[in-house]
Image: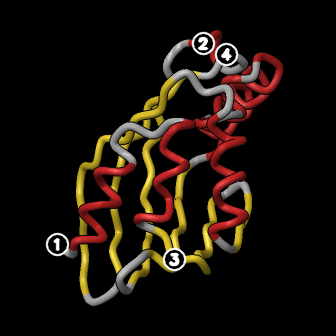
């Protein structure tokens, strides 16, 4: 496995507000980060983006389950567990996803694939009921 892929996996093992300072170690200045919520370009924009995202999170951990890496690209399967005071009554939330990264000596592109519903929408009381009803209807 490429060194930067190993660093990526270690970096996200325990992700927190304090982790944001270490982004320089794995990401290129011109990083492009994408996920189902949006797109951020440049390390100078990624740092405040991650800092804001982590500002109310009690904890966030990634358990890496699989890594497929070849010349300058990797796909990393993970399970994220986190707790947030405004979601799921502060109970732990588990989300399964995959990160696609492209790299040279640092990561130049990072895209996360995951179900936004399982991360957010299903844990907001009003939306939880609506999504539950939709799922039942679709399963019938």
Quadrant that contains the N terminus: bottom left
Labels 4 and 3 touching (C-beta < 8 A): no
Q: Quadrant of residue 131?
A: top right
Say if 53 sits above or below 22 in the image.
Answer: above
Q: Write the residue at 72% across / 63% down.
A: 45
Which secondary structure lies at badge 4?
A: loop
User: Which numbered disc flags the more N-terminal residue, 3 or 2?
Assistant: 3
Q: Which residue has dot 4 on it?
A: 85
Labels 2 and 4 touching (C-beta < 8 A): yes
Q: Write the residue at 29% across / 60% down.
A: 7
Q: Position of residue 15 (x, y in %)?
A: 45, 40
Which secondary structure lies at badge 1?
A: loop
For this view, does 35 lie left or right of residue 66?
Answer: right
Q: Which residue has dot 1 on it?
A: 1
Q: Quadrant of residue 107?
A: bottom left
User: Which numbered disc flags the more N-terminal residue, 1 or 2?
Assistant: 1
For this view, does 99 lie left or right of residue 109?
Answer: left
Nearest-to-viewer mark from 1 and 3: 3
Rounded to the nearest whole Å, what is the CA distance between mark 4 and mark 3? 32 Å
Which mark identifies residue 82? none
Quadrant that contains the C terminus: top right
For this view, does 121 lie left or right of residue 31?
Answer: right
Q: Residue furthest left?
A: 1
Q: Which residue has dot 2 on it?
A: 90
Rounded to the nearest whole Å, what is the CA distance between mark 3 and mark 2? 34 Å
Labels 1 and 4 touching (C-beta < 8 A): no
Rounded to the nearest whole Å, what is the CA distance between mark 1 and mark 3? 19 Å
Which secondary structure lies at badge 2?
A: helix
Q: Which residue has dot 3 on it?
A: 28
Q: Position of residue 4 (x, y in %)?
A: 30, 71
Q: Position of residue 38 (x, y in %)?
A: 74, 61
Nearest-to-viewer mark from 1 and 2: 1
């Amino acid at each position: 496995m490429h060194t930067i892929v190993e660093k990526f996996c270690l970096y996200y093992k325990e992700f927190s507000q304090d982790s944001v300072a270490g982004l320089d170690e794995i990401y290129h200045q011109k990083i492009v980060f994408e996920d189902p919520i949006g797109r951020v370009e440049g390390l100078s924009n990624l740092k405040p983006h991650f800092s804001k995202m982590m500002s109310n999170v009690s904890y966030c951990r990634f358990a890496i389950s699989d890594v497929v890496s070849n010349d300058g690209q990797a796909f990393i399967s993970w399970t994220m567990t986190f707790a947030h005071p405004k979601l799921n009554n502060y109970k732990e939330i588990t989300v399964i996803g995959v990160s696609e990264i492209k790299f040279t000596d640092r990561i130049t592109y990072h895209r996360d694939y995951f179900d936004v519903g399982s991360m957010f929408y299903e844990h907001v009381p009003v939306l939880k009921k609506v999504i539950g009803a939709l799922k039942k209807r679709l399963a019938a």
